[in-house]
Amino acid sequence: MASRKTDKYSVLLPTYNERENLPLIVWLLVKSFTQSGYNYEIIVIDDGSPDGTLEIAKELQKLYGNDKIVLRPRATKLGLGTAYVHGIKHATGNFVIIMDADLSHHPKFIPQFIKKQKELKCDIVSGTRYIGTGGVYGWDFKRKLISRSANFLAQFLLRPGASDLTGSFRLYKKDVLQKIIDSCVSKGYVFQMEILVRANQFGFTLGEVPITFVDRVYGESKLGGSEIVQYAKGLLYLFATT
């Protein structure tokens, strides 16, 4: 039980137009950590959302306290990768959890991540949609096919030692994540993929926990044609340089 008191988990939540989702994801996170007894902070990194996401975050901070809800906004949309770089600078935990703010990732899996990390003493725990009870809900056949194909192609080209290279729900030892981030060059969706490729290069250890990914309830998906092109370019870059 000593580690429950000494370990602290910093959750990085990049947001852009998530005013409907933010209150619920924060409530679920607070509930999960409170019930499991682990120390935590939630760092909201809003990229100048025009829908008032930051104002909602400020209200949540009043509700849960400055020590639990940490606001580190940026003036404009600068990309997912740089949001994590920005967030980790302000993280005071010795572990960092990265997840989406749109309810695609349920906080109920976090205690399983923590348990797996403690069992294996591993550097990273990654949520996976592609083994065991993992899966995806709310996607049509085309979206599932794109995801599966993207992951298969990445597996074939990069051999990352992870079953879900394109996922983004993970737990890291903070110093490990910092070292990996310092070596990464990607900024967008490819950033998540590059993290595991670099981790494999460094010889960091990985555990996996099956998760169910649920398509967003509120708001619009950020995945479009430009992101797919960005992914393809990033994949080829990683293949050429790793």
Image (tube, rainbow, N blue to C red):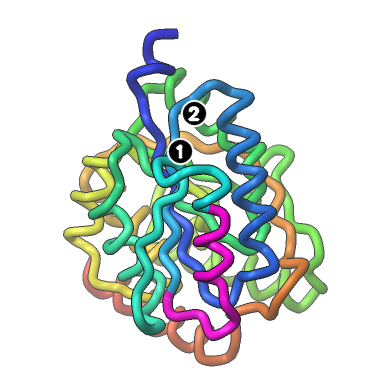
Q: Circle 1 is placed at which residue position?
A: 125
Q: Which residue is nearer to you in this view: 26 or 159?
A: 26
Q: Circle 2 is placed at which residue position?
A: 114
Residue 14 in the image: state x and y as whole percent.
Answer: 46, 64
Residue 19 in the image: state x and y as whole percent.
Answer: 63, 70
- Residue type pointed to by label 1: Val
Residue 33 in the image: state x and y as whole percent.
Answer: 56, 31
Quadrant housing residue 183: bottom left
The residue segment tinted magenta is 47-60
**Mark 1 or mark 2, whichever is nearer to me:** 2
- Judged left or right of residue 208, residue 221 is right
Residue 97 in the image: state x and y as whole percent.
Answer: 44, 45
Question: Does the CB distance between marks 1 and 2 fall below 8 Å?
Answer: yes
- Judged left or right of residue 138, residue 200 is left
The residue that appears at 48% across and 88% down in the rendered structure is: 229
Q: Is residue 199 above or below residue 37?
A: below
